[in-house]
Structure formats: structure tokens, C-alpha cells
Image (cartoon, coloured by chain):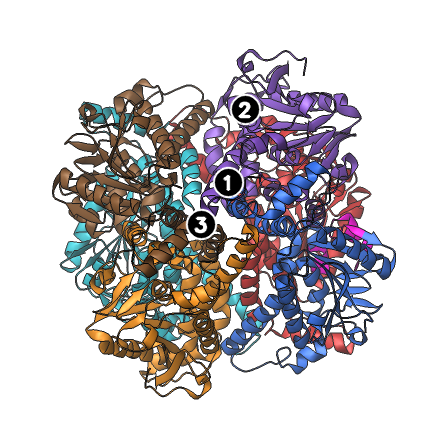
Chain colours: A orange, B brown, C cyan, D blue, E purple, F red
Amino acid sequence: MSTATPLPAYTSYQHVLVSSPGPFVAHVEINRPHKLNAFSQEVWLEFGRVFKQLSDDPDVRAVVLSGAGDRAFTAGLDVQAAAGDGILGESGGDVAKKAKALRSHIEEFQDSIGAMEKCDKPVICVLHGISIGLAIDIACCADIRICASNTRFAVKEVDIGLAADIGTLARLPKLVGSTSWVKDICLTARDFSAQEALSVGFVSQVHEGKEAAVHAGVALATTLADKSPVAVQGTKELLNYGRDNSVAESLRYTRVWNAAAVQGKDFSQALMSGLKKTKPRFEKL
Amino acid sequence: MSTATPLPAYTSYQHVLVSSPGPFVAHVEINRPHKLNAFSQEVWLEFGRVFKQLSDDPDVRAVVLSGAGDRAFTAGLDVQAAAGDGILGESGGDVAKKAKALRSHIEEFQDSIGAMEKCDKPVICVLHGISIGLAIDIACCADIRICASNTRFAVKEVDIGLAADIGTLARLPKLVGSTSWVKDICLTARDFSAQEALSVGFVSQVHEGKEAAVHAGVALATTLADKSPVAVQGTKELLNYGRDNSVAESLRYTRVWNAAAVQGKDFSQALMSGLKKTKPRFEKL
Amino acid sequence: MSTATPLPAYTSYQHVLVSSPGPFVAHVEINRPHKLNAFSQEVWLEFGRVFKQLSDDPDVRAVVLSGAGDRAFTAGLDVQAAAGDGILGESGGDVAKKAKALRSHIEEFQDSIGAMEKCDKPVICVLHGISIGLAIDIACCADIRICASNTRFAVKEVDIGLAADIGTLARLPKLVGSTSWVKDICLTARDFSAQEALSVGFVSQVHEGKEAAVHAGVALATTLADKSPVAVQGTKELLNYGRDNSVAESLRYTRVWNAAAVQGKDFSQALMSGLKKTKPRFEKL
Amino acid sequence: MSTATPLPAYTSYQHVLVSSPGPFVAHVEINRPHKLNAFSQEVWLEFGRVFKQLSDDPDVRAVVLSGAGDRAFTAGLDVQAAAGDGILGESGGDVAKKAKALRSHIEEFQDSIGAMEKCDKPVICVLHGISIGLAIDIACCADIRICASNTRFAVKEVDIGLAADIGTLARLPKLVGSTSWVKDICLTARDFSAQEALSVGFVSQVHEGKEAAVHAGVALATTLADKSPVAVQGTKELLNYGRDNSVAESLRYTRVWNAAAVQGKDFSQALMSGLKKTKPRFEKL
Amino acid sequence: MSTATPLPAYTSYQHVLVSSPGPFVAHVEINRPHKLNAFSQEVWLEFGRVFKQLSDDPDVRAVVLSGAGDRAFTAGLDVQAAAGDGILGESGGDVAKKAKALRSHIEEFQDSIGAMEKCDKPVICVLHGISIGLAIDIACCADIRICASNTRFAVKEVDIGLAADIGTLARLPKLVGSTSWVKDICLTARDFSAQEALSVGFVSQVHEGKEAAVHAGVALATTLADKSPVAVQGTKELLNYGRDNSVAESLRYTRVWNAAAVQGKDFSQALMSGLKKTKPRFEKL
Amino acid sequence: MSTATPLPAYTSYQHVLVSSPGPFVAHVEINRPHKLNAFSQEVWLEFGRVFKQLSDDPDVRAVVLSGAGDRAFTAGLDVQAAAGDGILGESGGDVAKKAKALRSHIEEFQDSIGAMEKCDKPVICVLHGISIGLAIDIACCADIRICASNTRFAVKEVDIGLAADIGTLARLPKLVGSTSWVKDICLTARDFSAQEALSVGFVSQVHEGKEAAVHAGVALATTLADKSPVAVQGTKELLNYGRDNSVAESLRYTRVWNAAAVQGKDFSQALMSGLKKTKPRFEKL
């Protein structure tokens, strides 16, 4: 269990702890350390809800995500719980009917994890210890990835007879440079290290141990929280838009986006502060 | 000429040798070593047919591709043969008529090479020695690229007055991280080394000499052939789909794909083996 | 001020100097060194016009871009001039009306900088010294990026309260391999060095000092200018097309493109020269 | 107020009445007749929830939508309520902050209305009386449109100084054949009649008066509810997919969809009944 | 059985008869009248091959398709033969394995029928008598649809427990103006008449009886065969391209296409004939 | 020659006359009646420039386009002038070089005509008399099409040995409901009448004679000019965006667009006027 003090507005969550290590920064911890932070359906529904709330919370400008405890960011799906939910393993019955249930189930799961990508505020994912299966799906939804040197990564799904379906296969190839590497780790399900993750660009920082990594994540979040929320959130939106659209379409969307954004006070504020060499203060968005 | 024993079902090919270095693994060798494995039309039509057959063959779960002989993976298009086919060099005549013939010719060529990408089974391409021009088009259709330390790579087409049209320009920028590098090698047609290919992520392993590289390719293929074919082939399909589609579209396609796939026996088999710590056996797909 | 001799056809420009360091090579210098080569509206309109002219000029086959003077490639937008243009900082008035003016203004700015990407000839961008804000938007439109070891890079827009809108957010993630890195530098607006730019693949060469970098850029341009213009320009077009389209669409476009291109004389010329081991000469395109 | 008996599972709704005029058929009525069935935020949130519930309800296979009362299907947005919500009319304040609130507000509104399109079961929209503004946005989300001869249609938004933003402009041009007509009615905001709606293909049936139209809608829904749910819901999904995708992509998605669907019992059931000339019975999906 | 004289180059087909009712015109007849021209796998494979051959045959410039005999264009899938092929009805076995077989089977079927759309020459489909199920999939691949007044149309698949998967759902909504009508006929599987098909724009001519309709189809084909093949085939290609692409992309593709096409002799020939008021003759393409 | 009084700001045009038949309405006439308003390069460059100017002119809110004189809207390309420009008919020379010139030439032509579609203000195209070839390309760029009963339409390009390349093939199928009809008229190049154009939805009004048609066009333009420019121009933009994008993408773009637009005064103005039943006045945009 994490020992951080929960933010008052986020005390109702059971499996996710939200604290605030600094102004406008929220730290989300997956909080089932005795289960290696594995995800049952209850956990992922909460995960989706917390990021929806953070997205709308004007007191939050940047988010750090980590796992509670020393052993794991997350060991992925809680397979036993999943079996109990009756989705996995259940065989027989009408194939078309089961297909409908599965599509619906996978969509709910994808939407819950994807809520982190949709969150208006930038999310820094700090990986550490066991970080396999769903851990990669989650990390792929973050904006910036940092890890501890002891992180053990794996896209594990092939080893349970399954093509990963919560987002890794859709997002990972767009996050790193080498498709040959992506296919290698996705098809073999082999472990890879923090150093390998850094060298292929999956993470952009490696720190000695979880504590140092979380510290670095919080420091980076603090930097982002200090800047214009209009600029930071607009930058996240436009980068995410660009991933899925042509350059011409992105430029068009950008024009329409900024036509409102630059009429906000943040822009004139920041501009003026820049000329006067003072530190700007930005209002809540 | 390769001295491997051809697989019985694949003995009719003239320019391509298919052997089986292990259970469920096929090794395809481009087999014109006296011509540096250069491709005439006859060769590329065979190349397309062999990968179509491998795609449908339930006894094959992973494929390794290399060139026969010590000197070359392939030196690319067999220019003399191409001239003889009357496609290249032939000038004059009606421009529109010739344009139609050329479109049709290029499409057949693209389809033949692209059959490797469409092959349901993962393909590991082992490059070695001379690997220029068409060699890059071919390598770009593989899932994982490995090479020998003596490989001499080049996107050579500009030097014969031509923009590469069999796939390199469409696929390469999506396989590696640096567009500046891609444009450099495509516009200058300069050679690049195994080490450079590794550092930009074009290949994911370099081995000392062809033999070691082929050996590593076979070992990797053996690993893949040992896993659930449903999971492995689904992972290949979803990664390839993701390359050409937005994340939202990929997630939708994934849901529909897995709604059938996870109802197969591989999934429950693998899951149960995981819990029981036994080695699963997967039926032919 | 640059001391190069301007090309006769390009003497009318005020803020951009165009010289020719070798046959078929043009060297464009942003020429406001006393303002750190900052861009006012007048400058970017000229910038757009000069690349339109270079695109159509049969005497130019490759272009090098750098900044004049020792201190900066460009310090980006000339904020004071922009304020004078009445676009920035001006608040109040009808929001919808101002939004229309802003969209139109941003589009003109995007089109001017984007003219470099649309230029039929390959452009090698040589960055040096201060290269922040708009410098990155510009560099992203080039084909190949080279820099001096003293280059100071930053995607600076967030620090003036703004999501970058002239192209960096649309293009940069498609130019380099690590999205985690892209989001880091775009959200933090921090400086990064030549070495970091090289390691993530943003630039493909680093040289000791501006002079050496420009020299390398000119050498590379000379290499390109020596090759078949049909092949070089077709390669640029097809690579740019591929960035924004699926592989299947790219292959289709490629067939149609080459159906005309390979009927040109460059192809038979280059082919024959290859067989005869002579150096081909290519006519103006 | 409608006098139909509400379905037990749907009695908690305040502004929407759901009854069942026949086996597996649900009839949804917008139920604020004293306000001409105008939509406040509370209404549209309910509207979204009811269609989400219908989508998941195995006892429903087809849906009819109409307005309660004789005067209107709906007069559109409840402008007074909207003003009270503080979204409309509120001027001043920070432009960027207000833009963020507006984007979020419009998205919630779009999602609520769009829930009808996402509903797995086919929806037949029966328009009658006043059917303006939001009425068209809603109708565009239905699968089949029927209307009473007294229907008064208008895309009214331009007359309140606004481009319609809940879906009409995105969907209408894809529902009918003449863009010249679409732009005419969207730009002029003029009324059009049931007959005009029929002749351009916006509705596919016109009936004398509301009662006859609702009756026809229910009859059509009963026909659909009698058929294989797997076939009907798959047909809706594939037609909607096709609207937004190329033919090649649709064919690919179709293959993957039907690979599970035709393994269901509905298919063998229907096939056998066809051969035996008996009436098939389909299980709940 | 049709009594037309088969074209020499097409005598090897078993189920498809190809004759030539005029210069450069081919008439294809589906030739299983005793089975209401129903399609077994053997028939659709032949269908695909014949259109591939017609596409490449320089002696053919326009194609007419009809059914042999008086009763049917085609009654669609030969359900009994399909059952015998072991694809349909076969239940049980591994779901994932069967899904793979089904995807592959549907793809082969789609490709065979789609060969008519891909055929370079325009195809005029003449529908008559029973024209249900697969008949609509086929008709949707034609360029121009004509029918006899006695035609009985139906998108019949829902009635055999299936979403149509050979192309109707992907293409039909892009061929006619009213989506409300499309969903009506696809979801209800009801019959519709020649007159209804005309009024919604599915067919563009109705003639009294099969003979008159075929006659009109041949006359139209003769008109097309008389025109420049470069212009006619280019027009077909660009219209088909446009269906699946944005206007901007279509304009770009058009420029590249015509850059070769207008250099052909057809263009100068036709232009000159226009000025001289003579009848142009076009060479084989 | 038209006898209307030219608008002062538009007197410099040679081949295009711009007058103002009412407040905020511009009437553009193609003004070469002695040449049946045929287009030379000079004419289409002017055509592009005039619509660019109208787009930016705050005194114009709606545009009517017609031809000067009684005989023709336009007879299309001025073939003799085109021959003189050396683009058409010129054969021989290097194919690749000519292809480049042709691509560039077609692009300039497409851009000039397309400027009408890009014009921010709605354009009503009034066709009359001879309206063939380029007339259709132009009409397809308008928002609303009206015609005189004597109009003679034809997509004439096939008869001069050419696939239409200025926009008809890209836009027409997206403007009307029946693809069978579109392919008929594009492949046969046959004439079609005002009545036929109306029945397929290409035009939305037919009037007896040119004068009545122009009068109706002006009346419609006057209606549009009376409404909120923010609403009208936003509606045009969003409808055009929707044509080329999926519904989900359109809804997203719409949210961002309206987030600025509804903060303008037009919206509160129109809303208040609606409640007070007064006539709103809108400021220049």
C-alpha cells in the first residue's frame, strides 16, 4: 500500500491512490501491491474513472503514474479474477453470441485504459519492477515514459495464446523507431530491460531504482505544471491528433485549434513575461 | 546452389529452395548464386507463389529467408534479363500504351514481393553479403530483419535513373526512426553497413558472418514456431493493420479479430499451461 | 550579412540570400543576422516565394539552407515585429472575427514555410547556433538535416503560451523514432544539443562548427545534383507521399508515377552508363 | 404525455418513455410535449443513456423513436434551459478557457445523441409535426427515417447564428443524394416538407398523420425483430462501417466480422429453415 | 444455355459464356440457367478469371454482363453446392481455426467478384428476372446498371442469417442516394422492383423485358467501345479512385495519371478529329 | 459583354466581371461571350484570383456565378488558345520532362478552378445554354447549382481523348446520388438536360430561361447574405470538411471550430433577436 496522503477529491477509489506531490501535480498509484498491482475488471474501471476525473479537474495540470510497492508497476491482467468474471476460459455456447460479449468486453477494457491517453493533462508513466502484459498497454497511453533500472518489460500476451488487444499492438509501433524490434518483442514475448527500452526510445529516461525514477517523474511533472495549461494541453492534443492524421490535415486542425487558444490570456501573459523576464502565472483552465 | 534438403511440397520451384531446419519452420533461399541471386521476372513470380503457399501451409509456422551462396542475399533486379523482357530500355511507341503496360508490370512485381508481407506466418529476413536494390524492397516486407556483419546494403535505384518502385519508399520510413537517414540513403544511393543498419533500427541483430546470422534466424523462427499459431499470426496481422490505420480504427479491428480468436483452443490451452507451469502444445491452424 | 555572390535570378529578395556553391546547387541563407535571423511576416513570405522559385528552376537540382552569420540559424519568430503586425497580443474585439483572421494568418504562415517541403528539389537543412522555435518548424520541412556541434535546439512555443502551429507538432513525430522524446521536448520547451538531436535521429550528421556543417551540406547537395533529376525528384515525392498514406495507396501512386518517369531519357541513360561504367549526364528537367 | 405502458426496465427515465408495442420491439418517445419535446441538457443525457441501455438489452431487437404528443417530434434545443445552463449567451471571460468548456460541452451533447447511431439494434425514426434543429441531428443518427405528411423540417441552426454542431452537417450529406439540396437547406435554414424529404431520399416513407407513421414504424420494426439478430445487427454495423471507410477496408473488416458471426447458430438455423420452408426462431443475442 | 458464339479466346470456361456482339465489345453470360445461374465456388473462380482476362485483352474495350436464360440474372449463392464445399453449416471444431478458414474463403470470394470492378474496361450489368443475394454484390461492381422491367431484386442475405459479405454492404451505399432506402432493403431483405431501382438511382435504365435490356446494354457498350480507350479507361479508374479518397487526394492522383495519358496518341487524334469534324480511330491499348 | 456595373474593387479583371446586385452579394460573370465564355489560361488564372479576393472581402457574403451573354455559361476549355500555349498537342521530347510540365500545368488549372470551392462565402452557380466540359468542373466547385431550362450539359472530355482532370471526376460522384448515372454521362460524354440534372440532384432548381435563373440565384444569395456570416461560413466549411472525412473526425473538427465561433457576437445577436422576434444585424466578418 502506498503511504502518500490521498487528494481529498480522490479518496473514494479502492485500487488507485491519488496524491499531490506538488502544486497542480497529481500522482496516481496502482494500489494492489500484494497482487503485484494486477488488474481485475474492477481495477480497470476505476483506472478509467480516475483519469476522466483528472482530465476535468482544474487543480491538476500534470500527472505521474506508478505502481504502489517495490515489486511491480503491474504484472498485467489478474488472470484468476478474469477467469472468475467468466469472460476468459469459458468455452462452448453460441459463437456469435460469445463474440458479441467479447467485443463489448474488450471495448470497455480498451476505453478504460485509453482514458489516460484522452486525459487533457500530460501523463508521465514511471515504470519499475515487473512491467509486463497490460503494463505495456498502459505505458503506451502515456505521454512520456521513464523507468527504473530494475524494470522487467515484456509484451507477454502471445504466451497466454493471445494477440494483445488493449492497445500495445496499435500504439507501440508509432512510439518507437524500429519495427523489427517491435515485432521481435511482440512475437517472442521475451523480456527486455530498461537499457533496451531506452536505446529503442520506448522510455526517455532510466533512473537507478524506483524511488529515483518516481522523483524524476514528479520533477518533470512539476516543470509541466508550471507552464501555461493552454499551451501544454494544446500541445498534447495536437501531437496526438498528428499521430493519426496526415500533415495537411494536422495543419488544418492546428489552425482551427489555435484560433481560439491564442485569444486566451495565457498567451499574452507568457509573451509579456518573456519580454519583461518575469515569471508568468497562469489561471486555472 | 544451396545444399539443404528441399521440403517435399516445395520441390517444383526453380529459383527458390525451401527446406525445413526444424519443426514448423521453413527456410526459403533465393537460389541463383551464380547470378548473385538477382531477380528476373521468372524469379519474382516464383517468389510470390512460394510465399502464398507458405501462408496456407498448416505445417509452417515461421519462415526464414536468406540468399543461397556466400556472396549475396541478392544483387537486386537482373538488369540484363529485364532488358530482354522488353520492359526496360524500350523507348518510343505510344506513351499512354506504354504507361499502361508499365503500371501493369510494376503491379505484378509489387504483388509478388508483397506476398511475403501478406504471408500469415512471421518471416525473418537474414541479409548477408551484397544486399542492394530489390534486396531492400524484399527486406522491408519481412517482419524481423537480422544480418551478417559483412552485409553491404544500398537503396540503389536512383543510380539507375529510377525512383524505387517495388516498396522500399513506401515501407522503409515506417520501419525505422529517422527520416533524415532514410532520405539520405534513398537519395544518395550510398552503401551502408550492418552496423549502421543496426543503429537506425533497420535490423535488430547483427551476427558475425552469414552462417551465424542464418543460425540466429532459424533459432528465432524456432521460438516463434513453438508458440500458439493463433496468437503469433494474430499479432502479425494486428501490427500490420496498425501501420496503416489510426489507433481508434486499430482498436476496433482488434476487438472484432479477437472476438473469434480467443474462442479458439490455443487461448485456453496456453492459459492453463501457464497456471500449471506445463508446456502447451498447439494444434495446426 | 552573408558575403556569398547571389545567383542572378534571385537578387530581388531582401531577407534571403541565394548563391550557388556548385553546379545545379543552390545555397539559401536566411539573411537577417543582426536579428538572429528572426522571421517577420515579410521574411516568411519571401521564404515561401524563394522555395517556389527554386522548385521551378531547371538550373537547380539540390538546395542547402542555413542562416547567415555565426550566431543563429534562426531565433524563430520576430516577436516584436509580430506584435507590430497586430496579430499577436491584440485582445478584445469579436472572438469569431478574430478567430477567422487568425486562421487565415496561420495558414499563410504555414504555407510559406511548407513551400520548402513542397519544393521539387531535395533540401538539406544545416542548423547551427541558436535554432529555436520556428527553426524546428523549418527544419522539419527539409529532407535531410545536418547540424553544427554548437547548435542549440528548442521547441520553444510552450514558453510563450502557445502550442507550436507552423508544423513542428504535425511533422516532428513522423521524423524521429521516440514519441516519448518528442513529447518531452515539445512539452518542456527545454534545450537539446546537437548530440541529442543526432542520437534520436532528428539530424543525420553533426560537424564541428558551422563552416564544416555547411561544407558537408554543400557536398551532399553536390552528390544529389549529380544524379538523375527524374530519379531524385521522384524519390522525394514518393517518400513524402508515403508519410501520409497507407502502404497499399503508396504502391498504387508509385505505379502511376513511374509509368511516366521511366519513359524518360534519364532512365535509359543511367542504365546504359551503368552497364558501360561511364558517367551519365542528365538533361535539365 | 404519452399514455403507453412503460417497459419495466425503463421506468426511471424522466423525459423519455419506453414501451413495447410487440415482441422484441421498443418504442422510445421523447416525452416533453408541453415543451414541444425540446431538449435541455437533462433530456439529452437521458436520451444517451436510454439508447446505451437498449443497445445492451437482449430483449430488444429493433427500436422506434417518435415524439410524444401531436405537435412536435422535437422543436430542438430548449434555448431557455440552455441559457440557464450558462453555456449559451455567456460572453466575456477568458476565450481559451471558454473554448475548452465549449468543446467539452459539445462533445457530451454529440455523444449523447450519437448513442442512437452506436446502438447495436436498428432504429427507425418517425418524424411528425415540428421537426427542426436538433430533430435533424437526431434523425440523421437513425437507420431508417419515416415521417408523417404534416412534418415541418428545418436545419434551423443558421438562424440562431450557429453552424449546426450535433451531427447534421457531418451526417446529412452522406444520407441523401443531392449536395446542392443539402447546402440549400443548411445555408438558408428554410422549412421543407415531408414530400420534399421523400423525394431527396431523406425519409423513405410518408404516411398520412402521426398515428399512421408510428404504426408503419412499428410494423417495420416488428419485421426486423423477427429476423436473425446476428444478421440484422451485423448488417447495421457493416453499413455504418462502410460509410466512413474505403471499399477495400470495408471488405477486410467484413471478412473478420463474419468469420465469427457465421459460426453462430442463427446462420445454420436460418439456412435450414430456408431449405425446409419453416419459420426459424432465433435465440437472444 | 446461351446460344451466342463464344469468342475463341474464351472457350475454355465452363460456367461463363463470352461472345462478341460488336467490335471491341464482349458479352459475358453467367451460364447455368438450369440452376437459375446460381454460383458455386467453381463458378465464382471462373467469374474472377474471365474478368481478369477481359481486363488484359486489347481486343475488348467494353463489357456487357447478363445471365443466360429467361428466368434469372442469378439467384445468388448455390446453397447446396456451398454446403457440399464444407464451408457453410459445418459447426463445431476449433473456433479460431474455422475463423481463419472463413476469412480466407470470404476473401477468395470477394476477390473473384471484385475482379469485375478492377477490370480496366467499363462493365455494363444487365439485370433481369431473379436478381437476388449475390446478384446485388455483382451488380455493385459494375460501372453502369441497366435492367429489364421484370427484374426482381433483393439483398437476401439477412434471411439466411447472415450479413452480406461479398460487397453489397460496402458498395451499395456509395452507389445510390438514400441511406434510409439502403438500410430498409438490406435489413428487411424485401424484394424491390425495376421501377424502385430506377427511382433510387441503382439502375439508370429500365427496358421492357430481358431482350430489350440486353440490346440497350450492347448499344451502350458499343458507344463506349467507339471512343478513345485511354480516355474511357482513365475515366473509369479516376471515378473509382475518387470513391475511396478525398477530393484533394483525387486531384493529386489525377494529375499524375494524366501526365502520362495525355502524351498518348488518342488525345492528339481525338483533338484533331474534333477540329476537322472527322471520326477518330483509336489504336489498341 | 455583360452590361452590369462592375464593383469598384474588381475593375482590373479582363475576362471576369464582378457586380453587386444587392447588399453583400457579388455577381461574377465569365465575360468572353464572343468565345462562348471559353477558358484560356489567362481566364482561369483570373478566375482563381477573383474568388481569392471575394473570399477575403468583408463586403461580400454570398456570390452568384453565371456566364455573360445568352449562348453559354461556358463551352469549356478554349482549345485553340490551349494549343497556342504549347501544352496540348505538343508531342515528342522527353516523356518524363513533359510529364513534370503537365503535372504542374494541371495543378495550376485545378487550383484556379478550386479557388471557388475554397472561397469562404457560399457560391451559387447559375448554369445556362452551353455548359460543357470545364463548365461541369466549375459547377462542381459551387455550393448550390441552379440552371435555366435551356441548359445543355455534357462531361465532354472523353470525346477529346481525355479523362476529365480539373475536378469533375473527383467531385461529381459526391454531389449526386446515382453512380450509375455519373458513369453513364462521364463515359459516354452525352448531353443531358436541365430536367435530367434536376432529377438526379445535380441542380436543385430549374428556371425558364437564363434571366429567371440568374434572378433566382441572386434572390437566394440575398437570403444568405442576410444571415449571420459566422453561421453561414461555418456551415459551408463544416459541410465541405465532412465530405472528405469520417463522421467521427467531422464531429471532432466541429467541436473545435464552434468553440471559437459561438463566442462571437453573431450568436448572441441572433439568439436574442430570435427571442425578441426582431431582425438581427450582423457585423462584417
Q: Nearer the viewer, mark 2 or mark 1?
A: 1
Residue C70 in which image quadrant: bottom left
Which three-letter amino acid code belongs to the residue tagged 2?
Glu
Can you see residue B95?
Answer: yes
Position in image of residue B82 (x %, y %) = 31, 22
Circles 2 and 1 on the same chain: yes
Q: Which residue position is annotated with label 1?
A: E102
Given the current orientation, which residue lies at the most extreme left position? B208
Q: Which residue position is annotated with label 3?
A: B264
The magenta stretch spans which residues?
D183-205
Which three-letter amino acid code belongs to the residue tagged 1?
Leu
The mark nearer the N terminus, 2 or 1, is 2
Position in image of residue A201 (x %, y %) = 27, 60
Q: Is residue C65 above or below residue E82?
A: below
Under circle 3, the secondary element is: loop
Q: Is D196 covered by the magenta stretch? A: yes
Q: Which residue position is annotated with label 2?
A: E46
Under circle 2, the secondary element is: helix
Q: Nearer the viewer, mark 1 or mark 3?
A: 3
Badge 3: chain ID? B
Quick check: E206 left or right of B71? right
Q: CA distance from mark 2 to mark 3?
A: 34 Å
What residue is drawn where x is 41% and y is 55%?
Answer: B268
**Observer-nearest residue: A277 or D62?**
D62
Q: How many marks?
A: 3
Q: Are marks 1 and 3 in contact (CB under 8 Å)?
A: no
Can you see residue C22?
Answer: no
Q: CA distance from mark 2 to mark 1?
A: 20 Å
Mark 1 closeness class: few <14, some 14–19, many ≥20 residues within 10 Å: many
Mark 2 closeness class: few <14, some 14–19, many ≥20 residues within 10 Å: some
